Amino acid sequence: MAETTPPSRTGVPVGIASTTLSDDPGCWPSVLTSSMRCEIVKKGPVQIMDIEFPQNLDNPPRRFTKDSYKRTMKNGENIHRSWLVYSIHTDGVFCFPCTVFGKRERDNALTTCGYGGWKNLSYRLKKHECTKVHCDNVKKWHDLQRRLQTSTLIDQRQMELMQLEVEHWKGVIRRVIAIVSHLAERNQALRGTTSTVYDRHNGNFLAQVELLAQFDPVMNEHIRRIQCKETKVHYLSGVIQNEIIQLVGDKILQEIARRVHKAKYFSVIMDCTPDISHKEQLSVVLRIVNCETPVSIAEHFLGFVHVEDTTGKGLSEILLDQLEKHNLSISDCRGQSYDNGSNMMGHKQGVQARILELNNKALCIPCSSHTLNLVVSDAAKSSAPNNFFA
Ligand SMILES: [Zn+2]
C-alpha cells in the first residue's frame, strides 16, 4: 500500500536523511541495540503538543488530544504521563519505556505500531500503566537515565585514556615491525646472547630499540614501563621477532605471486646445496618480465625448501608443490635453468625432463654462471698449494 511520509514538526519528513534516531517511536527499528537505547534515553520522550492531530474515520470522528498526557486521579489530582508519546508517523501513541526496554510483542500496539483507538484510549492507558511489565520498564528507564547522567563524564575520560593506550601500543608495534624489517633487509642477525634490554650482548634488534628510545617518546615510554615492571607485555621477545619475520615474509610472497600472475609466464631457477647443519636446501627462484612500468626483467626468490629426496622425482615434486602453493600453473612455465647435476639435467629422470613431460614449452638451459663457478672453483682447488681450498 502506498503511503506518504507525514511531515515532522519541523516540516522535514520523519526518519529520512537522519544520522541519529528520530524522536518519533514509529520510526524506530523493531530491534534496538544498547547504543540506540542509550541515545533514545539521553534524548528522552518527546511529547508533541502544539499540532492539529489528525481525525480518524469514526462516527463522530475522533483524534488524539494532549489531555491524554495527563491522568486524573479520583481526588482530582492530575499526574503527568511522561511515558506517553504520540507518533506523527503512525498517528498512534507509544509507551516510551515499554518500547525501549520491553519485548515489543505484536499484540501490544503501544510498543509496536502505535495505539490509535482514541475511543478507548483512556481505559487502555489506565490499564497499561498499572501492569507490572510497565512498572518494571519505567524503573529500567529511570535507572539508565540516572546512570547516563551521572557517569557520562567518567565514561568519556575512560574512553580517552583507553584510546591513548590503543595508540601507544599501535605505535610500539609499528616501531618493532620497522626495526625487524630494517635488519632483515640487510641480512643482519637480530638476536644476541642475551635478551635483556641495555645489555651490550643483546643483539642488533634490542640495540636498535634502545637507540630509538633515546629520541622517540613512544619507545622511550615503552622501555620505561618495562624497566619499572609496569607491563609484562613488551613485544620484544624472539618469538615476536620470528612472528613478524614470518608475517612480513608471507606478505612479500603474496606480492611476488601477484607480480608473477600479472606477468603470466615465468621461468624457474633452482639449486640444491647443504646448509651449515648439512641439511639439503633447495632455493627456488622465478624469473619474469615485470609488466609494471618501467618494464623490466625480475627474479624473485620464493625461499629455501628443506629437501629429503634429492632425486629428480623428489625435486620436481617440490617445484610443483611450490607453484601450487602460490596458485601458479606449470603450463605457464617457459623456461628452466639448473646446474649440470644429473638429478636436475638428466634426460630421462632429471627435473627438466619431468617438467618437459608436463609442459614441452618449458625449455631448459643450463645455468652458465653456475657451470663457470664450478670450473673456477675446481681449478682453484687443483692449483692451490697444500690443497688450501679443500
Ligand atoms: Zn508501558
Image (tube, rainbow, N blue to C red):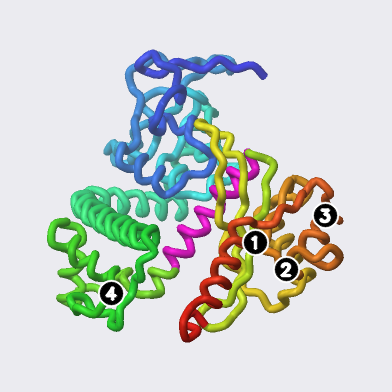
- Give the spatial CA distance, label 3 vs label 2: 14 Å
> Which residue in the structure is indicated by mark 2?
315
> Which residue in the structure is indicated by mark 1?
270
Residue 334's x, y, as percent?
73, 46
Residue 12's x, y, as percent?
40, 16
Residue type highlighted by circle 4 = Gly
Q: Main secondary structure of the magenta part?
A: helix
Mark 4 surroundings: few (<14), some (14-19) or many (≥20) residues within 10 A: some
Query: Which sits earlier in the primary sequence, circle 2 or circle 4?
Result: 4
Q: Secondary structure at mark 1?
A: strand
Asked whether mark 2 lies closer than 8 Å to ligand 1, one says no
Query: Which sits earlier in the primary sequence, circle 3 or circle 1?
Result: 1
For residue 245: magenta?
yes
Magenta stretch bounds? 243-262
* Residue 143 found in image quarter: bottom left
Q: Secondary structure at mark 2?
A: helix
- Foreground pick, 263 / 150: 263
For residue 265: magenta?
no
- Give the spatial CA distance, label 1 vs label 2: 9 Å
Residue found at x 28% / y 60%: 172
* Residue 382 found in image quarter: bottom right
- Whether residues under marks 3 and 1 lie with C-beta atoms below 8 angstroms apart, the answer is no
Q: What label does residue 368 carry, if any?
A: none
> Which residue in the structure is indicated by mark 4?
203
Mark 3 surroundings: few (<14), some (14-19) or many (≥20) residues within 10 A: many
Query: Which sits earlier in the primary sequence, circle 3 or circle 4?
Result: 4
Residue found at x 46% / y 31%: 93
Residue found at x 21% / y 73%: 226
